[in-house]
């Protein structure tokens, strides 16, 4: 049986709403099992520097609904080197830490896997608004980001309808279209342009032309940032069809705000599940929520297996248009 008396938790990479709820769940699960919980500040950078705080009951009180992460997050180039990771390991040994929970995206999971390969018990929790991680149906923060975008776009929609305009809204998602597709269905947008399914501007203008001919007076296009910028699309629409599109870039507002109840519950479930599995000796795994059930899968699945957009959601876009 592995010794697991003191468990550390860190948040790494891009922040996402719900990370605090996950940190709280890890800490409270430790306490429930009479274990100690240590918070690592600023992700792997803080791990290398030994920037640790004790997460007792009070330290995680009142954070369940707050956005961002109380532990802060950072990107660490040093941690990508074997020397940096050895330093991190030495800091954890010195502090008597027996296991680590990493909350972050696939970059952070690469780091977690490297620690596991060095023999250090490590488990990952997927926290990113992009939802681009295989091994889970939803990542923590995705639902909040969709709702934040929905809220902003519904306000734009009022103007689009009143002025009979063409709007292009650029949403985040890195190289994946999960956020864009979900937002497009939720807002009732006319078109979605995602990296997984390239749509040429020529095709788009052809479709716009026929829909205007059929009497449509306003159009909303949701564009994933991984395809091009909204400004580039605006220029291309003007060049190839003479369209005068209004563009909006939602940007970082999608990463902020209070998590939705869905994300708070998901983060709480995942935090407890990760900690309990670490305590029974599981390592090198990530937590996932598949068909509403919590499961573990190897960390490397997050980057070695491609996660596809739902064909059902894609066909819905066509059916509803
Ligand atoms: P995300 O976790 O949101 O995908 P990043 O890709 O920026 O964010 O990764 C976060 C951090 O994870 C990096 O700054 C680095 O410290 C660590 N990391 C990323 N890739 C590796 C790797 N191949 N080996 C070790 N650590 C890594």
Image: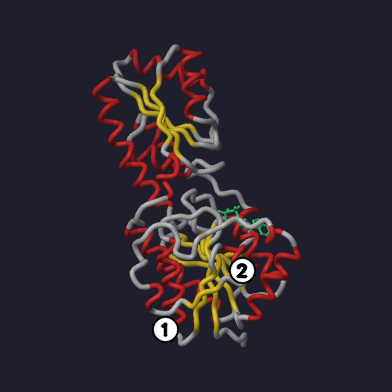
Q: Which residue is mark 2?
A: 47
Cα separation, mark 2 vs mark 1, equals 25 Å
Instruction: Estimate how packed mark 2 is, as few (under 14), some (14 to 19) or many (20 or more) residues with alpha carbons within 10 Å.
Output: many
Quadrant location, the N terminus: bottom right
Foreground tag (2 vs 1): 2
* Residue 248 point in image, percent of width and height: 40, 31
Q: Which residue is mark 1?
A: 32
Residue nearest the viewer, comparing 248 with 243: 248
Q: Secondary structure at mark 2?
A: helix
User: Which corner quadrant of the image does residue 32 belong to?
Assistant: bottom left
Instruction: Name the residue located 65 percent from the left edge and 62 percent from the top edge.
Output: 111
**Label 1 CB less than 8 angstroms from ligand 1:** no
| Rendered view: 110 above or below 172 | below
Q: Earlier in the sequence, mark 2 or mark 1?
A: 1
Q: Is residue 245 left or right of residue 54?
A: left
Residue at the image point whose x is 61% and y is 72% from the top: 50
Vertical comparison of 305 with 100: above or below: above
**Above or below for 99 versus 244:** below
Image coords of residue 292 (percent x, y): 41, 62
Asked if the beta carbon under badge 2 is closer than 8 A to the nearest atom of ligand 1, the reply is: no
| Vertical comparison of 157 with 23: above or below | above
Instruction: Determine crowd level at label 1: few under 14, some 14-19, many 20+ residues with C-alpha closer than 10 A.
Output: few
Which quadrant: the C terminus? top left
């Amino acid at each position: 049986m592995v010794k697991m008396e003191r468990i550390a938790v860190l948040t790494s990479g891009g922040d996402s709403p719900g990370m605090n709820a996950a940190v709280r769940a890890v800490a409270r699960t430790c306490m429930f099992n009479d274990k100690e919980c240590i918070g690592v500040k600023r992700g792997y950078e803080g791990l290398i520097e030994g920037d640790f705080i004790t997460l007792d009951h009070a330290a995680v009180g009142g954070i369940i609904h707050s956005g961002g992460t109380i532990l802060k997050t950072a990107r660490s180039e040093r941690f990508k080197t074997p020397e940096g990771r050895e330093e991190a390991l030495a800091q954890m040994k010195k502090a008597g830490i027996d296991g680590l929970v990493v909350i972050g995206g696939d970059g952070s999971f690469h780091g977690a896997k490297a620690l596991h390969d060095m023999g250090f018990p490590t488990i990952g929790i997927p926290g990113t608004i992009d939802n681009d991680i295989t091994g889970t149906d939803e990542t923590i923060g995705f639902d909040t980001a969709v709702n934040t975008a929905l809220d902003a776009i519904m306000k734009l929609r009022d103007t689009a309808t009143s002025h009979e305009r063409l709007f292009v809204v650029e949403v985040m998602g890195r190289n994946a279209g999960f956020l864009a597709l979900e937002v497009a269905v939720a807002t009732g947008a006319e078109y979605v342009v995602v990296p997984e399914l390239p749509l040429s501007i020529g095709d788009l203008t052809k479709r716009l032309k026929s829909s205007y001919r059929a009497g449509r007076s306003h159009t909303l296009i949701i564009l994933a940032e991984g395809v091009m910028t909204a400004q580039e699309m605006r220029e291309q629409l003007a060049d190839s069809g003479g369209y005068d599109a209004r563009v909006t870039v939602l940007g970082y507002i999608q990463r902020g705000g209070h998590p939705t109840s869905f994300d708070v519950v998901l983060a709480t479930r995942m935090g407890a599940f990760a900690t309990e599995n670490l305590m029974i000796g599981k390592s090198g795994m990530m937590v996932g929520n598949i068909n509403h059930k919590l499961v573990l899968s190897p960390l490397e699945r997050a980057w070695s297996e491609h996660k596809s957009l739902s064909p059902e959601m894609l066909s819905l876009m066509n059916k509803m248009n």
